[in-house]
Image (spheres, rainbow, N blue to C red):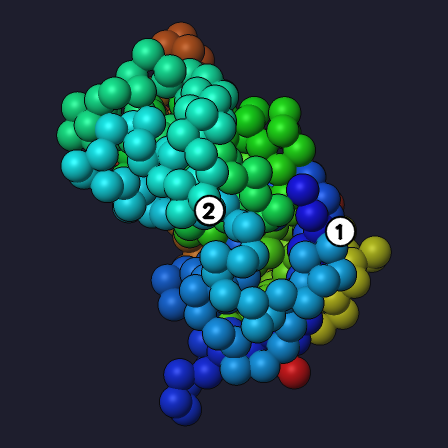
Amino acid sequence: MSSLAIEKLTKRFGASVAVDELDLAVREGELVALLGPSGCGKTTTLRMVAGFLPPSSGRVLFDKEDVTRLPAYKRATGMVFQSYALFPHMSAADNVGFGLEMRGLNATERRKKVEDALRLVRLVHLAERLPRELSGGQQQRVALARALVINPRIFLLDEPLSNLDAKLRAEVRLEIRSLQQRLGLTTLMVTHDREEALTMADRLVVMEGGRVRQIGTPRELYDAPKDAFVADFVGRCNILSGRRESETQFRTGSGLLLPVDSATDECKDASAFALRPERITLQTGGADGVQGRLKAVTYMGAQTEYVVAVGAEVLVVVQSTPQANEPLAGLKPDDTVFLHWDRKAPRLVPLALPRV
């Protein structure tokens, strides 16, 4: 495996800038996820790293070796595509061995490497099946084996789970992460799924408009977003615009005063109040809380979501579903409720960091 460095990488399509001077370093054996909305430049970045798309400027380095101008077949990257891109007329084994054949390995060497790769993804027993005879999860694992069999310097994943149903997605997600860690694969992954990114990646790169908004560990980005865009994209978040009234109060645009403890907050010119729904406790009484009116209750199994109007503002609360004999179990729309949170829980952030 190699380390990966991206330096001032830029891609223009005519007057449009898809990726704008992106800098990123991926350590050997690390899994880094590019996360962002459609059109933010994450897939374009991945394709430039793979060699499928030439950059307008900037460099791509594998272990300090400049590979920017090398064609894709000389970079030794293993890529798993969103659509799997399996040859429909070839067996699983032949799909896995195709890259080895193109590299000139003889049949005996290919057979051994293919068997080893299929064993890694637990599909040796299905080696002779065609893609149409495999489930979606099995096809995904064939695609993984095909990418791994060439012993890639960099492992690239392009929305690898988007075609799977929710249950299978969770299972394959764990399989990919376990395989990546066990083999020490240096991996760059593209996803728009925040849960996928949070559970799989060592670090996240949140992108917007071709630029990086923030880089950090999943916990860093979830607990300490630098702006409202990152707070909202990395996980569900109540975001209210306004201004810091004092170190202990934030005033929303509608005039509502909310309790905070911002004495150590880095952003002194905050224009947004960001608070995760699970950091709020909802009660049926308590005059010291923030009073609101319940608008909706949604049962989600182990958790229940409450939508609460507080003055002109609306806050979402998510907490463990109460037992049938608990006061919260009987709540219904228009009931008066009280919201409580640790004053250090809210983040006061700019609505967006300035583009430089």
Residue 120, which numbered label? none
Q: Nearer the viewer, mark 1 or mark 2?
A: 2
User: Quadrant of the rendered structure where residue 273 is?
Assistant: bottom right
Quadrant containing the C terminus in the rendered view: bottom right
Report the amino acid beneath label 2: Arg
Q: Is residue 319 toward the left or the right of residue 216 in the image? A: left
User: Quadrant of the rendered structure where residue 93 is?
Assistant: top left
Report the amino acid beneath label 1: Asp
| x and y percentages locating residue 303 in the rendered image | 42, 24
| x and y percentages locating residue 77 in the rendered image | 53, 50
Q: Residues within 10 Å of mark 2 (few under 14, many from 20)?
A: few
Residue visible at 34% across and 47% down?
82
Please name the residue that numbered disc 2 is placed on: 103
Q: Residues within 10 Å of mark 1 (few under 14, many from 20)?
A: some
Residue visible at 57% across and 43% down?
152
User: Quadrant of the rendered structure where residue 267 is?
Assistant: bottom right
Please name the residue that numbered disc 1 is placed on: 261
Residue 256 is at least partly visible in this image: no
Distance CA(mark 1)–CA(mark 2): 61 Å
Question: Which residue lies most toward the right here?
Answer: 264
What is the secondary structure assignment of the residue under circle 1? loop
| x and y percentages locating residue 45 in the rendered image | 50, 64
Q: Nearer the viewer, residue 133 or 351?
A: 133
Residue visible at 47% across and 22% down?
112
Residue visible at 83% across and 57% down?
263
Question: Which residue lies most toward the top here?
Answer: 325
| x and y percentages locating residue 146 in the rendered image | 41, 36
Quadrant containing the N terminus in the rendered view: top right
| 267 lies above or below 277 | below
Q: Nearer the viewer, residue 72 or 42?
A: 72
Residue 63 is at least partly visible in this image: yes
Q: Is residue 90 toward the left or the right of residue 69 in the image? A: left
